[in-house]
Image: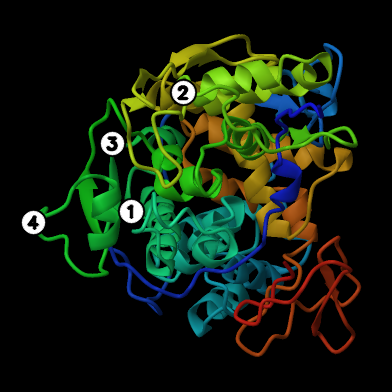
Amino acid sequence: MRSHVTWSRCALMLAALAACDGERHLLGDRLDAGSTLGTGGTGAGGAGGEAPRVGGSGGTIIAGGSGGAGAGTGGITGLGGSGTSAASRPLPMGARKAVTAVARLLWQVAPDASLLGMADSGAVATAEDLRKVTLRMLIDARAQTGVGAFYRWWLDLDRVATLATAQPKDPVLFPQFTADLAAAMATETQTFGTYVTLDGDGLFATLLSAPFTFVNQALAGIYKLDGLDGVTGTALRRVALDPTERAGLFTQPAFLAGTSHPVDTDPSLRGSFIQTKMFCQAIALPPVGVIIQLPPPATPTPSTTRQRLTESVSQPQCEGCHQYLDPLGLAFEHFDPIGQFRATENGLVIDASGQTVGLQSGVATFDGAPQLAAVLAKTPEAQVCMSRKWIEYAVGRDLTDQDSAAINDAHRWFARSGFNLRELIAGVTQTDLFLTNPPLCTPGQDQTCNDNPILASLHGHCTEGLRCVCGSGWSLNSSTGRCL
């Protein structure tokens, strides 16, 4: 009989660089679009110490044997940095190009007359001037577009929004899983991430551990909040959650449903998502002939997914990767394939305990998703990965070993601010990589791209006519002009 083993399918979950759906949610007292900007204001405070340094591209978990989690060039190599400040440097691309790059990153439109006027007046002459302008631009309501688009890209939310048709759940077990519900799941996570970043305290820890979210009537059923006052129709409302059950991004249905099958959860898939999105470590492809679907129970005796998974991956060729993935994914076993909380599975108590494996920062134990979220928020590898993701989004391409200086520079701002996301975004604009390589293929409504036609990336390039042309395997998003 052919052996059935489980394998992470993270390699099949390629990030789609996509845009916000344009829905604006003014959840805080933000500047109206078009308000005049000044260079005043400082951003988040708090001393976070020096940032750990990184060495370039993320590691790869190697299949088979007992190899490590691939810290390699992507591991943390020490503390501190060169100490060199970019604050007083003139902007290499000039003031107009610099504010244009930031406007297209955060607002996803060309800069307005106010920004261009500042650039022409000499008010944006140095990198520090640009950082202050960036922090002010984050206060503007238009920043919801660019920040929302980051979360849709980073967390594969466009894919989640189409789950009801692309990968529907079992209609008998989950009749409530409709196209509208799947779309609401994606919008919830985008709304939450944007709110924490722009309207909330901006802290990385809040993003991962906040005991609140935003729900509409359909989502309220997933959270068992049916009938809650003020939660009706399709509009999203902020609600408090039980902190012993849910905390932050990864206890929201978008992640939980997006990493599950029609009938069952998939701890390996959930773990691989955390490994790639939170630790920036790639996952090796499974050996030829390996079946990636968890087999059905071998006997009629009730069992949990954890028990079935443990039996399936006990073979040597599986342990090499699953020792890193499965403990992370099993932390979410209190959530079913559409993200509903459950205390038991098949009448059996769920064991959601585990520990991190293969991280240079050491081993951390947890029991359940809220505890794992707290661990992730404090893990240096996750903090560095967040810096890396924002740079990749900003420059429109995957980073390589040659980009480690940019990661270090941006992360230094992140760490010193107490891991404030607004300061991280502003810090990205201080890196040589951003200052000399404006975002690729990020146009306004007319689909024209930035004004350097020779720039190119894995995603696409700009033609001499300033049109976005996508690389092989990528297609143009008509609403944003980004290649995905």
On-image quarter of the N terminus: top right
Q: Please name the residue that numbered disc 1 is placed on.
A: 199
Alpha carbons under labels 4 and 3: distance apart:
18 Å
Q: Please name the residue that numbered disc 2 is placed on.
A: 372
Q: How many marks?
A: 4
Alpha carbons under labels 2 and 1: distance apart:
25 Å
Residue that extends furthest to the left in the rendered view of this protein: 229
Alpha carbons under labels 4 and 2: distance apart:
31 Å
Q: Please name the residue that numbered disc 3 is placed on.
A: 211
Q: Is residue 172 above or below residue 351?
A: below
Callout 3 touching callout 1 (CB < 8 Å): no
Q: Between 139 and 309, which is closer to the camera in this rendering?
A: 309
Alpha carbons under labels 3 and 1: distance apart:
16 Å
First-in-chain label (1 vs 4): 1
Q: At label 2, which amino acid type do we have? A: Leu
On-image quarter of the C terminus: bottom right
First-in-chain label (4 vs 3): 3
Q: Is residue 200 visible?
A: yes
Q: Between 39 and 245, which is closer to the camera in this rendering?
A: 245
Q: Secondary structure at mark 1?
A: helix
Residue appearing at x 63%, y 9% in the figure:
362
Q: Residues within 10 Å of mark 1 (few under 14, many from 20)?
A: some
The image position of residue 398, as x and y in percent, is 79, 51
First-in-chain label (3 vs 1): 1
Q: Which of the numbered marks, if any, corresponds to residue 229? A: 4
Say whether residue 116 is left or right of residue 48: right
Q: At label 1, which amino acid type do we have? A: Asp
Q: Residues within 10 Å of mark 3 (few under 14, many from 20)?
A: many
The image position of residue 317, as x and y in percent, is 84, 20
Residue appearing at x 34%, y 23% in the figure:
347
